[in-house]
Image (cartoon, grey):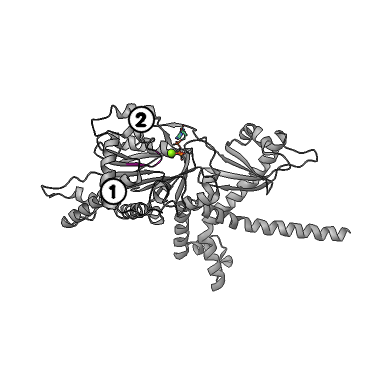
């Protein structure tokens, strides 16, 4: 009996040690997926250590300390040794993560005991994983130990102070009987007011506030933008402050605002110089056709002048006297699905034309100063043309209902882990992914910043004219 239990103990210890050996590998994989490995620091150390090996500094150190018998003279051993030394910065980082988790487990056990989350038979919630979602936010997965999620939520303030963290959200997965705690070591604002001073450089705009920094980009750096998220996330509010900001900052920008949800979101921009607001697919198609001919004109003008894009043209010294107006155009589509799905409001021919034109603007607009900003609740390939989506390099993704929608936008389920805070989003630019609180600008404030409307033709007049001319151009239209 005693022999059996000692064998069992040995097996347990071996399993535990094997698991411990694999832990750093899991940490590296997690870090790679969430892009939290400090690549620059690790790469610098790796380069330094590899150079050290190349110049045999290790051998000099060993001979100086009289440990040359430790030097791996066998070629195979040397290869293993050299690989371990040069990749050691990554392994050190991974081991630090393992240690961090072990310490966290100790703290958690204490916190749960103090918070009364210990069952009558002494069961405590157990740590399953604690991995980074982005450089500042982490997700803690715990077994629920038979407690409902409401018990965790009720104790969240207590757990926050015990662990010195800021909890964004506590949610449960009934099937796996686990609880996810989304948290950070840094506080995050639940509302960030719009301020024109936050992004003052030409064509620059603020994306949002992370836990530590203000994130801003510009039309040059991020020429096209996708704004995605479920209803009520904050897409239209984000578009409103972005349009107001770009307009106030550079009054010369021309806006084509396509609002296919009844024209209410953009009504404050009607009857203003530099703004065209269209509430119908047909009128949108006509305006997009105009934009496409502008694209052709600009392209041939730049070719004639030997410039690859408008930036190069602006830098050019000997500009022609009769140069056309090269001011930037921003096309904003609120609810792209209405534009890309044929139905009661749009016929298949209109939809097809709109798809082709938006796709061309997305592909060629950057160099010609024509930018596209598309907002959508539904990021699937039916509701948003894949070619258009592929060219929208900057992505703001508000909370998503399910993992598949989040994956369609961000490539992972990060947007489903966002707390239910209006204006909270993930900003993705290239491989960088950050949680941000987007700037809030109320409609009233936006209107007062814009000032009274100019004496431009009313929306109704311009829309009627556009629809009439669209009918001439697109007739006969096929109905779905
Ligand atoms: N950045 C923000 N900060 C604070 N509150 C916000 C923010 N953005 C949006 N909200 C609040 O959330 C509400 C819904 O926002 P909004 O209408 O922009 O959502 P939406 O994503 O456009 O929804 P839908 O898809 O239904 O049009 C707004 O009325 C506003 O009160
Ligand atoms: Mg909206």
In this rendered view, identify the residue nearer to me: 200 or 75.
200
The N terminus lies in which quarter of the figure? bottom right
| Mark 1 Cα-neighbour bin, 10 Å: few <14, some 14–19, many ≥20 | some
**Quarter of the view holding residue 198:** top left
Q: In the structure shown, which secondary structural element does the residue marked by tag 2 occupy?
A: helix
The C terminus lies in which quarter of the figure? bottom left
**Quarter of the view holding residue 252:** top left
**Quarter of the view holding residue 125:** top right
Residue 67 picture location, percent across and down: 57, 63
Residue 471's tag is: 1
- Residue bounds of the magenta highlight: 257-262
Residue 10 picture location, percent across and down: 77, 59
On the question of residue 262 being in view, the answer is yes
Please report the residue visible at 40 percent of the width from the left and 30 percent of the height from the top.
442
Residue 446's tag is: 2
Q: Earlier in the sequence, mark 2 or mark 1?
A: 2
Q: In the structure shown, which secondary structural element does the residue marked by tag 1 occupy?
A: helix
Residue 193, above or below 95:
above
Residue 462, above or below 318:
above
Number of marks in the rendered image: 2
């Amino acid at each position: 009996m005693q022999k059996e239990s000692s064998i069992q103990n040995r097996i347990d210890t071996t399993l535990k040690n094997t698991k411990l050996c694999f832990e750093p590998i899991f940490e590296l994989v997690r870090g790679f997926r969430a892009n939290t490995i400090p690549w620059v620091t690790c790469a610098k150390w790796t380069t330094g250590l590899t150079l050290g090996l190349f110049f045999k500094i290790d051998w000099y150190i060993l001979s100086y300390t009289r440990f040359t018998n430790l030097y791996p003279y066998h070629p195979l051993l040397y290869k293993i040794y050299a690989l371990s030394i040069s990749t050691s910065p990554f392994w050190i980082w991974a081991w630090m993560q393992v240690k961090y988790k072990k310490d966290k487990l100790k703290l958690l056990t204490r916190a749960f005991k103090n918070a009364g989350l210990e069952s009558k038979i002494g069961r405590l919630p157990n740590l399953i994983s604690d991995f980074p979602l982005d450089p500042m936010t982490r997700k803690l997965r715990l077994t629920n130990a038979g407690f409902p999620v409401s018990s965790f939520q009720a104790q969240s303030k207590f757990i926050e102070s015990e662990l010195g963290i800021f909890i964004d959200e506590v949610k449960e997965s009934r099937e796996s009987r686990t609880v996810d705690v989304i948290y950070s070591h840094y506080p995050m604002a639940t509302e960030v007011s719009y301020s024109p001073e936050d992004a003052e450089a030409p064509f620059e705009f603020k994306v949002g506030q992370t836990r530590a920094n203000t994130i801003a980009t510009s039309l040059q750096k991020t020429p096209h933008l996708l704004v995605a998220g479920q209803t009520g996330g904050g897409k239209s509010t984000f578009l409103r402050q972005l349009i107001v900001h770009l307009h106030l900052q550079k009054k010369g920008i021309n806006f084509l605002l396509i609002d296919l949800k009844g024209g209410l979101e953009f009504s404050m921009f009607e009857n203003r110089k530099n703004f065209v607001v269209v509430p119908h697919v047909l009128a949108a198609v006509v305006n997009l056709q105009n934009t496409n001919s502008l694209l052709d004109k600009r392209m041939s003008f730049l070719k004639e002048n030997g410039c690859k894009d408008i930036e190069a043209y602006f830098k050019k010294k000997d500009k022609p006297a009769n140069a056309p107006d090269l001011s930037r155009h921003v096309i904003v589509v609120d609810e792209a699905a209405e534009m890309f799905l044929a139905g009661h409001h749009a016929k298949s021919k209109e939809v097809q034309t709109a798809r082709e034109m938006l796709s061309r603007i997305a592909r060629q607009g950057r160099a010609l100063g024509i930018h596209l900003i598309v907002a959508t609740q539904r990021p699937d390939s039916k509701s948003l043309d894949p070619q258009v989506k592929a060219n929208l390099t900057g992505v703001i993704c508000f909370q998503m209902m399910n993992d598949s929608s989040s994956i369609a936008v961000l490539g992972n389920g990060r947007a489903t882990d966002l707390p239910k805070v209006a204006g909270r989003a993930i900003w993705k630019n290239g491989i960088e992914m950050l949680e941000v609180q987007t700037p809030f600008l109320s409609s009233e404030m936006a209107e007062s910043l814009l000032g009274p409307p100019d004496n431009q033709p009313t929306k109704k007049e311009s829309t009627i004219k556009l629809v009439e001319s669209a009918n001439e151009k697109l007739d006969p239209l096929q109905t779905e």
